[in-house]
Structures are given as C-alpha cells and as structure tokens.
Image (cartoon, rainbow, N blue to C red):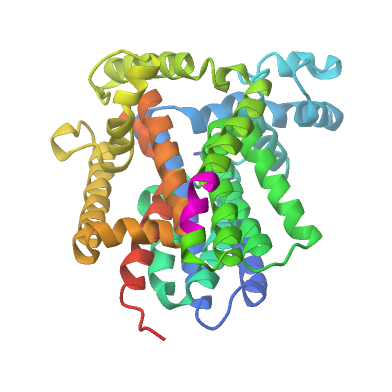
Amino acid sequence: MGLQDLIVTPVYLLLLYALAYWIRPKVTNRDTRKYFIPGLTVKFIGAIALGLVYQFYYGGGDTLNYYNWGANIVWEAFLDSPSKAVSLIIAGREYPTDAFDYASRIIFFGDLPSYSIVRVAGLMAIFTFNSYYAISVCFAAISFSGTWALFYALDKYSPRIGKWTALAVLFIPSVFFWGSGILKDTLTFAALGFFIYALLEIVKWKYPSVLNFIILLTSSFLLYHIKIYIALSLIPGAVLFVYLFYFSKAIRNTVLRVMLTPLLFGGVLYTMYFAASKLGEDNRKYSLDTMAETARVSAEWLYYVSQVEGGSGYSLGDDDFSQPGLVRKFVPGVWVSLFRPYIWEVRNPVMLLTSLESIALFGLFSYVVLKVGPLPFLQRLLKDPLISFFIVFTIVFCFAIGVSTFNFGSLARYRIPVIPLFTYSLFFIHFERKEPKR
C-alpha cells in the first residue's frame, strides 16, 4: 500500500458514493432502496480486503500480478507517452510497435482473457494515479452494477421474498469478497448479472428493447471472451428457460404437454450440443472433443500447485478423465463445488471461511428438501422456468469446475457465479410452498 493509495482511494470512495446516491432513486423502489448502499459498501469492503489478504497473507497472487505486471506498466507507458498507453490498452495479440518495450514486460500479453483485465485496470490506473486500491474499488463498483441488475431482476420476479433475494445476491461473504477486486471473476460476475437481467426483461416481461438486446449481447461477449466455460455452462439452462417459458404458456392441455415433453427436451439437448460445438470452434481447449483433456491438464496442474503451497488440494477418486471416468465424477464434481471443503479438510483460515459457508449452504439445502419433501422439491425445480434455468446452470457449471480445479482455494473463487443463484432457488422453492392459493 503506497502513499497514493492512502490519498486517492478515499477520494474515489467519496466520488463513487456520491454517484451511488444520485443513481439510487432511478434504480430502486420503496422496498429495495434500503439494500442499495449496504450492497455497494460490502463490495468496497470485499475489494479492499481482497487486496490486503493477497498482499499480507499470500504475499502475491493474481490480483497483484494484474496490477504489478499489467496496470502499473500501462501507467509507466502513459507517463512516457499517452499514445503508448492507448496502444497497450487497445492492443490485440500482436505487440504494438510504438510500445513494444512496455508490452514485452506485461506477462499477460497474448492471453486475451487475462489481458482484458489488464486493459480495464490499465485504463483505471491512468485516472487513479496508479493506485491499486482505488482501481480495486472501481472494479467493485462495476461488479455492483451487475450484481444490482441481478437483484433487481430477481426481486421483480419474486417480490414476496425480497429480503431473502437480497441475502442471496448481495450479502454472501465469498461472493462480495472474490467478486469485487482486480480479478476476472469481478467482471464475469457483473456480466452474468446483466445477462440474466436482460434475458428476463426480454422473455418474461416482453420488453425486447434495443437496450436490452445490447446488454444481452455485450454480457454474452464478455463471458465468452473472459471465461468461455461460464458461457458454455449458461447455454443449457438459458435455452431450457426460453423453451419452458413459451412451452408452458402456449400449451394448456396437460396430456398434450406430457406427450410433447420428450420432443422439448430433445430440442434442448440438440441446441445445447450445437451451441457448445460452435463455441468450441473458436477455442479448441473447450471444444467437445478436447474438453476432457483440458479438464485433466487443469486439474493436475492446480492439484500440484495446491500440494506445493499448503495442501489445499482434493481428489475425486481417480485420474481417469475419459468419458466414462467423467460420468463417474459427475456427482462428486457437483458436490465438491457446492458443499466442500469439509471442516476436517481445512488447512488455512481462508479454507475455514469457505468450509463454514459450505456447511451453511448444505444446511439450507437439507432444510428446504426435508421441509418441502423430496418429490415436491423436484417437482418445483421443473415447475418454474427460471428455477429450472438456475439449477441446470448450477449443475453444469459445478461439474465443470469440480472436475477441473482440484484446489479448494481456486474453487472458492470459481464457484461464485452459482452460489447466489442456487441460494435464491432454495429460498424461492421454500417460500413458494407457503404462498396462499388464489
């Protein structure tokens, strides 16, 4: 933490709070207004805490690397010549000739997903006098914009459970901690929130405005460009949501609906396969024929790192990443993403916090299933198109990260897109049970 952090960061906090108070009347109502500033505040706390943990506990890591070997170099180029900084920010895979001496020092150059964070952080560095913590709170503000869009959409969808929606979306500790600093997860979580908001506005509320389509396409592009596996995991649930929404509205006859259900799910599966194969054409690591190998390589590397750096690795039983092996890992992969590490697997304070949160999530899941009943619980998963979307996304995404991470530290960060949606789904199912019949 430098002198510029102590001076610039408070100034930016004041400016961002002033902007928030100005925006709040435009994006809240009488019931949601009370959550706006507290939700923004925990994001700021998460961003600053993340930097302090990486600086003083880990002694380095991704967020500091994006700053030290990315944004900081863009700032140095700006002091030399503003045009060189612009060249770095807009650069593609090729080194800019006028700023080669700076670009060659950026360790993320050529890795376009990681370099996206360098672009944003570098641009902010110019306006924050290269203050790490001022950049961090700006990232937190971006994350909050998408988080609030998600909360706004879900509260509009189920206004009866507004306080529980706020808890699920705004105030889960791991989400506002890992999803607020200078990390990929911050931008992708914001993009996910805007994606769900725009999808609901277009499909549920029948408001296909140009702005909503721009939000939907822009958020999809960001997810695809920064973390393609989130985009791949969204496809099945989003397609199912659209199909179920229009399917349930269009066909009132129960017998006909039952007869057409197999065709419906066949169409969903085909759409999933087609979309995944097309997305994989642009990134061979995530194409259908190489996805298992990608998972194996990622898992082995992260497991090795975890053993070297403190023993936070986990295993799913064997090293078989063939198709039958992945099928065997399906349930353990989903389970580890949602409900582990167990308390006896804890090796450090960060793992302890993740474990306590996993215990709380498992307790909520068990309570809702037992209170509602296993069969009614499953029926309600399929009854509501949005909940079906969230559960399918949760399962697909948790399996993807569970079989390719093998490190509890990384898993705690990777899983933040699903934790709010899964928690909201449990609250929705539980309180939907209590809704009086009309």
Magenta residues, as a range? 257-264
Residue ID at (26%, 24%): 316
Residue 262 inside the magenta-drawn segment: yes
Which of these two is toward me, 83 or 394?
394
Rendering quarter of residue 301 = top left
Residue 284 inside the magenta-drawn segment: no
- Report whether residue 385 is seen: no
Rendered view: 279 above or below 382: above
Rendering quarter of residue 343 = top left
Residue 103 image position (x, y, % from top left) = 72, 18
Residue ID at (60%, 41%): 131
Which of these two is toward me, 241 or 22?
241
Residue ID at (36%, 56%): 423
Rendered view: 311 above or below 129: above
Q: Is residue 267 left or right of residue 102?
A: left
- Report whether residue 147 is seen: yes
Q: Is residue 183 left or right of residue 367?
A: right
Q: How many marks?
A: 0
Position of the C terminus, as image quadrant, is bottom left
**Residue found farthest to the left:** 344
Residue 414 image position (x, y, % from top left) = 43, 36
Residue ID at (40%, 41%): 395
Residue 28 image position (x, y, % from top left) = 59, 75
**Residue found farthest to the bottom:** 438
Helix, strand or loop: magenta stretch = helix
